[in-house]
Image (cartoon, grey):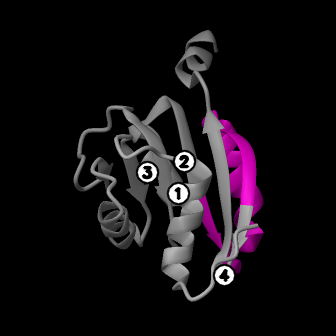
Amino acid sequence: MVELCNVSDHEQVVDVMVALTRPSRLDSVMITGNERMELYLSLRRRGFARAATPETCRIPRQRHVIGLVTGPNPMAALLQAAPFLSANSAVAVLIESREAGSSMNIRHRLQQIGFRIEAGVRCHRGFVLFASRRGFSQLEQAA
């Protein structure tokens, strides 16, 4: 578990998501959810030049290797991020404390779109779930 002192809840969520997904400064990062602009600006301040939101990257071309999902409706934000993510991508989803009951739905949805859950970390605002998929387009073609 990651414990950070004297850091705002928002910055702690960003720290946890970056620690779990381990993006390089050159990786394409897709950010969705209600807090996408705050997260986008926070990543840009940290040197991630290729961070994007659905508004800044209008054509879903499945080229982003990292997805960061926040907000009160993580299921909708996850579905919004999916078309932008590559076949070999990783995603971090914030499940806020008040959304704890929907965590099983989010886990099921992640598995449906080809992600394998690998880790989870508790933070002040809830739980950050980390999942990755490897070669998902090959699985789609085989099905």
Q: Which residue is mark 1?
A: 18
CA–CA distance between discs 2 and 4? 20 Å
- Front label number (3 vs 1): 1
Residue type, numbered disc 1: Val
CA–CA distance between discs 2 and 3? 22 Å
Q: Which residue is mark 2?
A: 22
| Secondary element type, mark 2 | loop
Closer to us: 80 or 130: 130
What residue is at 39 percent from the left and 48 percent from the top? 29
Q: Residue furthest top?
A: 142
- Of the image marks 4 and 3, the number of the one nearer the N terminus: 3
Q: Are marks 2 and 3 in contact (CB under 8 Å)?
A: no
Magenta residues? 93-120
Find residue 123 and name its label. none
Q: Which residue is mark 3?
A: 80
Residue type, numbered disc 4: His
Q: Residues within 10 Å of mark 3 (few under 14, many from 20)?
A: some
- Of the image marks 4 and 1, the number of the one nearer the N terminus: 1
- Front label number (4 vs 1): 1
Q: Are marks 1 and 2 in contact (CB under 8 Å)?
A: yes
- Of the image marks 2 and 3, the number of the one nearer the N terminus: 2
Q: Which residue is mark 4?
A: 124
User: Where residue 89 appears, x then y in whole percent?
Assistant: 52, 36
Q: Quadrant of residue 26?
A: top left
| Secondary element type, mark 4 | loop
Q: Are marks 4 and 3 in contact (CB under 8 Å)?
A: no
Closer to us: 90 or 8: 8
